[in-house]
Image: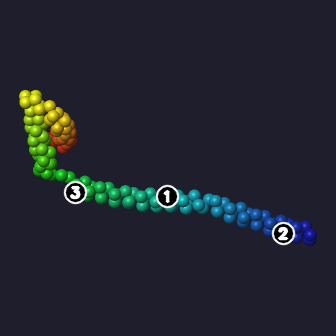
Amino acid sequence: MIRDVARVGIGRAMMGYAALLASLVLLFAAPPALAANAAAAQKNNSAQVLEQFDRQQVQRVGSDKLSDHRKHIIIFLLGAPLIIMLLITGGLGVAMGVYGKQQLFVTHMLFAGLTITLALVHAVVSVVWFFPF
């Protein structure tokens, strides 16, 4: 009889250990499965978010595009002062060389630097906007 009680006690203890082991397996096996489901849901959600950004980008690119007429006006507004500054720089250079006005050297160099800078800006903008025609 004592042996029967001992067998029943050992059997109950084994059942308890088996239940504990099963609980631990479920405890550690369930989070990766849940994480996989959450990752799949997150991928779908992130794909939707990226699609929204793509749609907004397409709308933004279409609205920010300058027309050719507007580009021509901007190039003209850069070119008109460029020609005026070029004439002033040339006039100052002639005044220095022909008439001996050496005190105009600093002014001539200042206008020459500004003219070159504006010419470079005009050239870069023209190439970027109109080179491929």
Residue 63 numbered mark, or none: 3
Residue 79 numbered mark, or none: none
Q: Is residue 68 visible?
A: no
Question: Which class describes the residues within 10 Å of circle 2: few (<14), some (14-19), or many (20+)?
Answer: few
Q: Nearer the viewer, residue 28 or 90?
A: 90
- The residue mark sitting in front, 2 or 1, is 1
- At label 2, the amino acid type is Val
3 sits to left or right of 16: right
Question: Residue 89 appears at what percent x and percent y?
Answer: 12, 36
Question: Residue 58 appears at what percent x and percent y?
Answer: 27, 55
> Which residue ends up furthest to the right in the rendered image?
2
Question: Residue 37 appears at what percent x and percent y?
Answer: 51, 60
As helix, strand or loop, the secondary structure at mark 2 comes to helix
- At label 3, the amino acid type is Ser
Where 131 falls versus 71 (above or below)?
above
If you read the primary sequence from the N terminus, does the residue marked by circle 1 or circle 3 appear first?
A: 1
16 sits to left or right of 123: right
Question: Which class describes the residues within 10 Å of circle 1: few (<14), some (14-19), or many (20+)?
Answer: few
Spatial CA distance of label 2 from label 1 is: 46 Å
If you read the primary sequence from the N terminus, does the residue marked by circle 2 or circle 3 appear first?
A: 2
Q: Which residue lies under the disc numbered 1?
A: 39
As helix, strand or loop, the secondary structure at mark 1 comes to helix
| Quadrant position of residue 92 | top left
As helix, strand or loop, the secondary structure at mark 3 comes to helix
Question: Residue 61 appears at what percent x and percent y?
Answer: 25, 54
Residue 8 numbered mark, or none: 2
Q: Residue at x 64, y 62 (%)?
A: 27
Where 110 falls versus 73 (above or below)?
above
Q: Nearer the viewer, residue 43 or 113?
A: 113
